[in-house]
Image: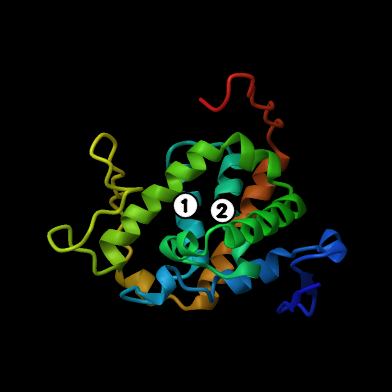
């Protein structure tokens, strides 16, 4: 069995029977994600998974998505509090061992946070919002130059390119925020969405008879 010690003092099990007893906590998720940098740290400023997650949830909100979909968007990378974040090329290089670990931990966390159904129902939109965030991050935070660098297949499909949003991720107010500010922002967004969900009628299960549309 393998496990790690979280900031709350809980032992989080990555494998074995004890994995079933895991009880992830939003505080430890927010704490860890706010200190894990995206792009393996290759950004113009520290840019955390927590900030990315809030951005994805914000993109969902801007499209009028339900509170349930926004919550799933916020938590789509919550398992990275326990696995760490890997840049996509690193994941591809690792192959199936990484995929098995990531899927296992994602399932554990989504179950514990009560968003497994929403993750499934809104998976196509969450992927699209995630890519819109990625396009925005590439534009503002990385050294990417389309005249010098290879295209990114997930963003630069000529038939359906993914475009960034107008938000400037290098704005002074964002650059001045500390990791703890993004931890708090993540928790506040989570709490706000939970309050809204309590006042909304439950979403009807999506009909998947003919697959995702």
Looking at the picture, how far across and down is residue 136, in whole percent? 32, 55
Q: Nearer the viewer, residue 94 or 198?
A: 94
Number of residues whose C-alpha sits closer than 10 Å to that of mark 2, classed few (under 14), some (14–19) or many (20 or more) = many
Looking at the picture, how far across and down is residue 107, in whole percent? 70, 52
| 28 w.r.t. 79: above or below | below
Q: Residue furthest top?
A: 210
Quarter of the image for residue 78 reads bottom right
Relative placement, left or right, of 21 versus 81 is right
> Of marks 1 and 2, which one's residue comes earlier in the chain?
1
Q: Nearer the viewer, residue 157 or 186?
A: 157
Q: Are marks 1 and 2 in contact (CB under 8 Å)?
A: yes
- The residue wearing badge 2 is 74
Q: Say if residue 188 shows up in the picture.
A: no
Relative placement, left or right, of 191 versus 21 is left
- The residue wearing badge 1 is 56
- What SS does tag 2 mark? helix
Quarter of the image for residue 174 reads bottom left
Q: CA distance from mark 1 to mark 2?
A: 6 Å
Number of residues whose C-alpha sits closer than 10 Å to that of mark 1, classed few (under 14), some (14–19) or many (20 or more) = many
> Which residue is drawn at the image coordinates 31% and 44% (left, top)?
162
What coloring was used for the rendering?
A: rainbow
User: Which label belongs to residue 113?
Assistant: none
């Amino acid at each position: 069995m393998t496990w790690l010690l979280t900031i709350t003092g809980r032992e989080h099990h990555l494998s074995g029977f004890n994995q079933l007893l895991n009880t992830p906590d939003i505080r430890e998720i927010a704490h860890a994600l706010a200190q894990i940098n995206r792009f393996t740290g290759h950004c113009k400023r520290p840019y955390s998974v927590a900030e990315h997650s809030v951005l994805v949830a914000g993109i969902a909100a801007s499209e009028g998505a339900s509170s349930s979909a926004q919550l799933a968007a916020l938590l789509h990378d919550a398992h990275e509090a326990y696995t760490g974040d890997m840049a996509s090329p690193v994941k591809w290089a690792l192959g199936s061992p990484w995929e098995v670990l990531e899927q296992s931990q994602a399932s554990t966390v989504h179950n514990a946070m009560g968003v497994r159904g929403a993750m499934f129902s809104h998976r196509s939109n969450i992927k699209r919002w995630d890519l819109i965030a990625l396009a925005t991050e590439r534009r503002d935070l990385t050294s990417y130059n389309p005249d010098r660098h290879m295209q990114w297949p997930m963003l630069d499909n000529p038939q359906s390119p993914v475009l960034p949003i107008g938000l400037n991720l290098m704005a002074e107010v964002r650059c001045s925020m500390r990791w703890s500010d993004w931890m708090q922002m993540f928790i506040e967004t989570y709490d706000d969405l939970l309050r809204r969900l309590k006042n909304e009628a439950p979403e009807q299960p999506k009909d998947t008879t003919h697959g995702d549309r």
